[in-house]
Structure formats: C-alpha cells, structure tokens
Image: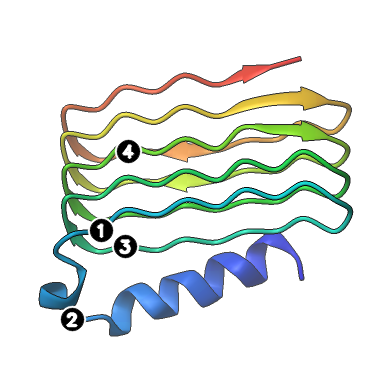
Amino acid sequence: MKLASVLLASAMILVTIPLANAAGNEADVSQTGKGNQAGIGQVGKGNYSGIGQVGKKNEAVSLQAGKGNVSGIGQFGKKNEALTVQVGKNNVSGTLQFGKYNEATTTQVGKGNSSVIVQY
C-alpha cells in the first residue's frame, strides 16, 4: 500500500470519528522488519502520536486535528517516507530519517506550531 492510500484511508477515518470518541487520544506504533507501513489518525483533545520503524520499505503518516497535538515518526532503513499533518492548538512535530530515499512532509496550521525534520 502506498503512502497516498494510507493517507486517504486515515483521512476517511478522521472524517467519520465523532469528536467525543477521541478525547484521550494517544498512539504508538513500532515496527522493525521488512514491509513497514503505519497510520494513526486522531481528532480532538489530548493528541500525541508516535511511530517508529526500522527495517526496509518504511512509510508513515500521522494526521491529528485539535488540541494538545505533538507527533514523532523516526525511520531508519530503506525507502523512508513520512507525512505529518496537524491542525489546531499546541502543535509540535519531529521526524527523523536515516537512509537513502528520505522524504518527509509536515503541515501545521494553527497555534503553537514548531517542527523539525532531520535527514541523513
């Protein structure tokens, strides 16, 4: 599955989750081996994200919508790709990639913003 497909699926999930169900938010993913991919969605309140990945065909996404935001992502491996989108409130981001095919995108919209992308 390509990053665009993961992004589309995550966006559709974000649109269909009522705000009340997302109050606590938080998520972690950690992968090691070959085909790596990840997701994460989240809509409103405490937010936080994660993701890890080490192995081969890394891809990640994150998305978040409103309140505490924060994110992460950190890939080491082969075909790194990442995407973080945050929308409103305290934002912050991250993203760290080591490898050959590094590619990252971060979009933040309103309030505390801040972002760092490091690629080797």
Residue 45 locus on image (x, y percent): 13, 55
Q: CA distance from mark 2 to mark 3?
A: 10 Å
Residue 54 is marked as none
Labels 1 and 2: the sequence-earlier one: 2
Do the CB atoms of the residues marked 3 and 1 lie less than 8 Å apart?
yes
In the rendered view, would you say 22 is above or below 107? Answer: below
Residue position for label 1:
25
84 sits left or right of 31 in the view: left
In this rendering, the count of numbered labels is 4
Q: What amino acid type is highlighted by mark number 3?
A: Gln
Residue position for label 3:
42
Q: Nearer the viewer, mark 1 or mark 4?
A: 1
The quadrant in which the N terminus is found is: bottom right
Residue 36 locus on image (x, y percent): 77, 55
Do the CB atoms of the residues marked 1 and 2 lie less than 8 Å apart?
no
Residue position for label 4:
108
